[in-house]
Amino acid sequence: MSDTALTDVERIKAESRHLRGTLTESLEDPVTGAIAADDTQLSKFHGIYQQDDRDERSERKRARLEPAYSFMIRARVPAGVCTPEQWLNMDRVANRFANGTIRLTTRQAFQLHGVIKRHLKASIAGINAAMMDTIAACGDVNRNVMAPVLPALSRVHREVQADAERLSDHLTPATRAYHEIWLDGEKLDTPEPEPIYGDTYLPRKFKTAFVVPPQNDVDIYAQDMGFVAIVEDGVLSGYNVTAGGGMGMAHGEIATYPRLADVLGFVPRDALLPVAEAIVTTQRDHGDRTNRKHARLKYTIEDRGLPWFRQEVEARSGVAFSEPAAFSFAGNGDVYGWQRDDAGDWHYILYIENGRVVDLGERQLMTGLRRIAEVHTGEFRLTPNQNLAISNVSDADKASVQALLDDHGIDNDTQASALRLNAMACVALPTCGLAMAESERYLPDLVTQLEAELEAVGLGDEAITIRMTGCPNGCARPYIAEIGLVGKAPGRYNLYLGAGFAGDRLGAAVLDNADEAEIVATLVPLFRRFADEREPGEHFGDYLVRVGIVREVSAGREFHQGAAA
Amino acid sequence: MSSLAAENAVLPIDDARIDRINTALSGLSPAELTWVSGYVLGLAAADTARAAPAGSSALTILYGSQTGNGESVARGLKERAEAAGFRVRLESLADYKPAALKREQLVTFVISTHGEGDPPDDAELMHEFLLGKKAPRLEGLRFAVFALGDSSYVNFCQTGREFDARLADLGAERLLPIVECDVEFAAEADAWTGDMLKKLPELIAADDEAPRLRAVESRAPYDRDRPFSAEVLTNQKITGRNSGKDVRHIELSLEGSGLRYEPGDALAVVADNPPRLIESLIAELGADPLEAVRLGDDMLTFREALGSRLEITAASTSFLKAWAAHAANPELDRLLEPAQQGALTEFLYEHQIIDVVRRFPAVVDAQGFATCLRALGPRSYSIASSLEANPGEVHLTVAAVRYEAFGSEHEGAASTYLADRVAEGDSVRVYVEPNRRFRLPADDTLPIIMIGPGTGVAPFRAFIEERDERAAAGDNWLFFGDRTFTDDFLYQTEWQRYLKSGLLTRLDVAFSRDQSAKVYVQDRIRERAAEVFAWIGKGAYIYVCGDAKRMAGDVHAALADVLSAEGGLSAEAAEQRLKELKRAGRYQRDVY
C-alpha cells in the first residue's frame, strides 16, 4: 500500500500551516453557510463538523437554496468531569446558539448541534469562557481522554482523573491556530513547533481511555490506546497498557473491521506519559497515510504484528513492559441511582436516553439539570454510556438534589426497562453526514417493541446491552453490544449478536440489511430460548455463543467470516 | 480613375474620412461607381429631411412612462397620424431637452404617474423644468395631455394633471381636455387618438411628401387584447421551509408564440380572481351568483364577472366613491373629503374591496356592485430570465401575497393565482410589456451594479444570464437583501455558481432579520462606498429594482451619500449627479 499516493486529507493537513487553512476567510464569506471544502477537514481538529439538515436537502436543492448547513461543536471534557459552572455555561451556549439541547457523547464530551456559521465564533468563545475547549475533540489527533465514572472510589477516581488530564494536556496539539481563529489570539508569522504530531498530525483519529476494573464503562477494548488501572489495597500502582482497539469499518469492505485492543503489558504510573507518547509517535510514523480506511492504529498493529509494536514503543519510550497484572471486567454499563463513595459523598447516576439533554413534556431534563447546577457544590461526570453522574453530593445536600430531580420529572429507574437502561444510539439523521439510517430517532421505538417481548418471557429486568449506529463507523460501539445494529440504508440494519456483556468480545453478523420485522422476528425466539435455557447469571451474548447460535468472534480479522447458523 | 486629392483644402471633409472613402471605392467598376453616386445622393437627401427642424407642419409626441403603456399609446398615435400623411416626431421625455419646448408649436404629452403621484423617471427633468420658477412662457404652443395612472392610488394621474394645468398657466393653448386613464386604458386611448386625428387637419397640413408608412413597427403577436396561453413548465417554491414568505420560481413556455423579450422587460399575466374571495363577496352581498350582469356589451353571470372580468382585490378611489353612494356611511363619506387625502391613502393601502364591503355594508344588487368595480387588469412581473439563455421560455419570480387582516385571510389575486391555482401543465394568459427604460448597457465592457432586494432580484437574474450568453466582459455587482440568509436567499445556488465562474464579480447581501440590528441593501452600499464610487467612475450602470414605497428612496439616498462621501459633493450636487446619471441612462429603476 505504501506505493499509493497520500490521501487528500494528508495534503490538506500539510498545507494548513498547523490547522489554520483558510478558516478565517471561510467564516467571513457571507454568501454561503458552509466553509471551504478543505476547511471542513481542518475544522474537525478544532472540534467542529460541518453538517446539513439532511431532511431538507433535496427540498432545498429544488428551491435553489444551498443545503441548510450548520455545525456540530464538540467540547472536550477530559475524564468526563465538569464543574457546575461549566455545565451552566454549556447550557447557555446551547440555548443561545445551538438547537437548545445538549448531547452527551459516548466519549464523555459535550456536543452542540445546529450552530450556524455566523454564530460559530461566538459559540466557541462562549465555551472557552468557562475554561473548556473544543480543540482536538475531533480530527486526526488524540481526542477527548476518557476515564471511568467510578462512583464508589473517590481517591482512585481522583488519581485516575489527574492522570487522564495530564495525558490529555500532554497530547493536545501545540498549534496556536485555535486561539488565533476563535479567540482573536495574536497571529504568528511563522507556525509554532508541533513537537509530538509534526506538520501532518496523525494518519487518523486516535482515542484514549483509562479504566478501573471491574467496570468497563469506557469500553477499553474499543480504544486505540488504553490504560487499565491496577489498584492494590486501594492504591493505584500503575497501568496495564492496551493498544489497537477501534470500532470503525466500511460496509462491503472486508479489509476493514472492528477490532478489540491487545494488552501490551504493565507499566508503573510514572511511565504513563513516555509510553503514551511513544504509542502516538509510532502510529504517527507507521500508520497508513494512503488509505483512510486502513489508517487507524489497529491496522498498523495487525499489519506489523504486536511484538514489533511492543518493541517499537519500548524503544521509543525507554520503558520496558512487565507482565500484565491480572484483571477482569463485569460489565460495560452504568449503575444507576444513588451510590455512596468511600469518603461518604453521594453520586446519582442519571439515565439519559441517547445522551440527549432536552426538556420533553413532564421530563424537564434540561431545566432540571440547570437548576441542580445552580446549587450543586460537587461536580458532574459525563459517563461513557451517554449518561450523567451528579457527583460529590454531601449527605446534607442529597435531599435537595433529589427534590429538584423530582420537581422536574427526572426519574431514572422506575420507568425504563433494563434493556432501555443499557441502550445507546449515535446521533445519525438528520445532522450526521455519514448516517445511512436513523439511529437516535429510531432506537427508542425499537426498544419499546423489544422490551415488551422480553417482559413477556420474564426477562423485563434482564440487563442486555443494545446499541445502534446509523453507519458502520461505530460511534455508539455497536460491535461490542450484545445486540448490535448498524445502519445500512433507510430502515435497514445489519444485526450483530453474541458480544460480551463487558465489551470484551465482538458480536457476530446475524442479519444483513434487515428491516424491523426481520430483526424482531429473529430476536424474539432467541429471547424465548434464552429465558428457558440460560444458566444462572448467564448474559445473553454469552448464552448465544455457548449454545452455538452464533459463533465466537475471537479477533477482529475474523469478524467478517460467515456466521454460524 | 483618380482618387480624391487629400490636399484639396476646399473639401468639407477631413483627411481620415477621405482615406476611408477611397478605400471603400477602390476597385469598383464604372457601373458600380455610377450606382454608388446615386446611392450617396439619396442618402444625403434622406439625411437632410431627417435633420430638418420641426416646423409648423409637424406633430411632436412626447411620452414618459414607467411600464411601456405610455409609449404604446404614443406609438399608436404616431402610426395613425403618419398613415394620415402628417409629419410626426416621437420622443421619450428621457431624450428630450426641456428647453426645446419653447420652440415647439404642437405637442401631445402621453404621461403616466408613478406610485404616490410621482413623475416617471423619464419625465423627471421635464417635470422639474415645467413646474420650476424658470419655466418660460409658452404662448406659441398648442398641446394635449393623455394621462395614465392607477386609481388605486390617491394621487391618480397626478403628473398628467400637473403638466396639463401648468402648460395652460404658461400660456399654451389646450387643444383637448386632459384624458385620465386607469389601468384599463385601451378604449380611452383609441378615442383620444381619434380626437387628435380629427383636430390635426386644422392645425397642420398633411404632407404628401412625408412617407406614408403603415405598420412601422410590427405589432407584437400577442398583447393585452389577445394574450398568449403559456404552459406552466415549473412552479417551484424557492424560499426555505421556515421562511415567512412563499416565493415561487415560475417557468412558462412561449413555444409557438413567436413572443420575444429583452432582459428588463415585464410579463403581464392575466389572472383569475381567488375563488374563495369570489364566494365571500357573493355571500357578503347576499347576491345570486347566477344573476346576469352586463359588462359593456357582454352579459354574463355575476360569479363569472367576479371571477375573470372585474378587479375585486385592490380598492381604488373610484370604487370607494361608487360604494359610498350605496353605503351612505358618514365615516366613509368623510374619508372621501379632499382634506382627508393622507387618511385615504392609508386606508386604501390597508383595505381590500372585501374589507370595504364588510366595514361599510350596503344593499346593492349584482349589477350595482359590478358597476362599482374596475375591469380586471393584468399584473406585471419583471421577467427573471434571458430569452437567449432559455429559448422558448420566460421565467418569473413571484412572491405569493397572503396575509391576515380584519379577521380574515387575504390574498393577492395574481400572485396566488400563479402560486396556488395553476399547476405545471396548466396554462396562463400572458403578453410581453417592453421596458425600454431598463436595459443592459449596449457596451458589454461596461460594469453594472444591480440592486435588487426581495423579488426585485428577478430582472438581475435575466441580466446575468444575458451577460453570460453575450460573454460580456464588463464586471457585474449584485446587492441582494431579504429577511433571512437561510430561508430567503433567492436563487442562492445560482449566484454561488456565477461567483465561482467569475461572471458575478461581487455579491453583497443584507439579511434584515438575522441579527438584532436590521441591515438592508442601502447599508451595504454605504459600507462599500469607495468601491461603488470607483465603479461609477469606471462608467458603471446602476440598476434598482423592487419596492418603490421605501427601498427605492433609501437606496437613492445611499447612492447620494456615496457620491457625497467619496466624491466630495454637496448634497445638492450629489442629487444633481444622480439626475445626470439617470438622464444618461446610467441609473435605471424598475420599482413598483
Image (cartoon, rainbow, N blue to C red):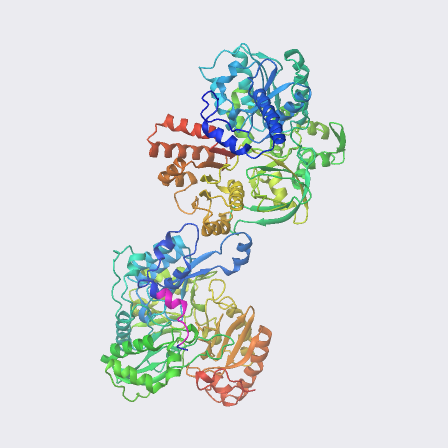
* B112, B551: nearer the viewer: B112
Q: Quadrant of the C terminus of chain A?
A: bottom right
* A283, B12: nearer the viewer: B12
**Number of marks in the image?**
0
Q: Quadrant of the N terminus of chain A?
A: bottom left
Vertical relation: B423 (above or below) A550 = above
Q: Is residue B184 left or right of residue A325?
A: right
Residue A113 at least partly seen: no
Q: Position of residue B218 (x, y in %)?
A: 66, 32
Q: Residue at x 33, y 79 (%)?
A: A226
Q: Residue at x 30, y 60 (%)?
A: A177
Residue A74 appears in which quarter of the rendering?
A: bottom left
Residue A363 at least partly seen: yes
Query: What span is colored magenta in the figure?
Result: A3-13
Vertical relation: B121 (above or below) A76 = above
Q: Position of residue A37 (x, y in %)?
A: 42, 60
Residue A381 appears in which quarter of the rendering?
A: bottom left
Vertical relation: B558 (above or below) A153 = above
In the orientation shown, which residue stands out farthest toward the front? Answer: B1
* A365, A287: nearer the viewer: A287
* A96, B514: nearer the viewer: B514
Q: Position of residue B148 (x, y in %)?
A: 59, 25
